[in-house]
Amino acid sequence: MQDFRKLKVWEKAHNLTLAVYRQTRNFPAEEKYELTNQLRRAAVSIAANIAEGSSRDSWADFRRFLQIALGSMNEAQYYLILSRDLEYVRAADHERLDGLLVEVRKMLTTLICRLRPSSR
């Protein structure tokens, strides 16, 4: 349908993923296969589902992948809250990353609404 790299929401989601990777480098070693991995996977899933959905044959399929990305976003947001509460992430860093999540969420929900059959 379209090149995902041209979508602003994908670009923002990709930047969010890079920020999560940078932040989790400082997590404790014992979290490498636990919280670090879970948070990274959730962040990657956001951008990956946008990319995969953009190649689908119908707007309905694309919308379904965007909804999956939204679910991954909620998962990532929870892991960030947990990371902050465990004091792996400073409050200021949490606010910055949460702000990125909120921005991507707004873009995703707007795109999902635009792809609804009644909106097309």
Image (cartoon, rainbow, N blue to C red):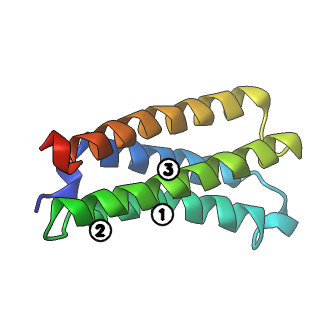
Q: Position of residue 102 (x, y in %)?
A: 52, 33
Give the Cα distance between marks 2 and 1.
10 Å
Left or right for 33, reference 119: right
Q: Quadrant of residue 68?
A: bottom left
Q: Which residue is mark 1?
A: 45
Q: Seen from this angle, which residue lies furthest front?
A: 118
Question: Are circles 2 and 1 on residues that touch, CB within 8 Å?
Answer: no
Give the Cα distance between marks 3 and 2.
19 Å
Q: Give the amino acid at mark 3.
A: Leu
Q: Position of residue 93 (x, y in %)?
A: 69, 32
Q: Give the amino acid at mark 2.
A: Glu
Name the residue rendered at 37%, 43% in the picture: 108
**Mark 3 or mark 2, earlier in chain:** 3
Q: Secondary structure at mark 1?
A: helix
Q: How many marks?
A: 3
Estimate how packed mark 2 is, as few (under 14), some (14 to 19) or many (20 or more) residues with alpha carbons within 10 Å: some
Q: Position of residue 21 (x, y in %)?
A: 58, 54
Q: Give the amino acid at mark 1.
A: Ser
**Mark 1 or mark 3, earlier in chain:** 3
Estimate how packed mark 1 is, as few (under 14), some (14 to 19) or many (20 or more) residues with alpha carbons within 10 Å: many
Name the residue rendered at 41%, 47% in the picture: 13
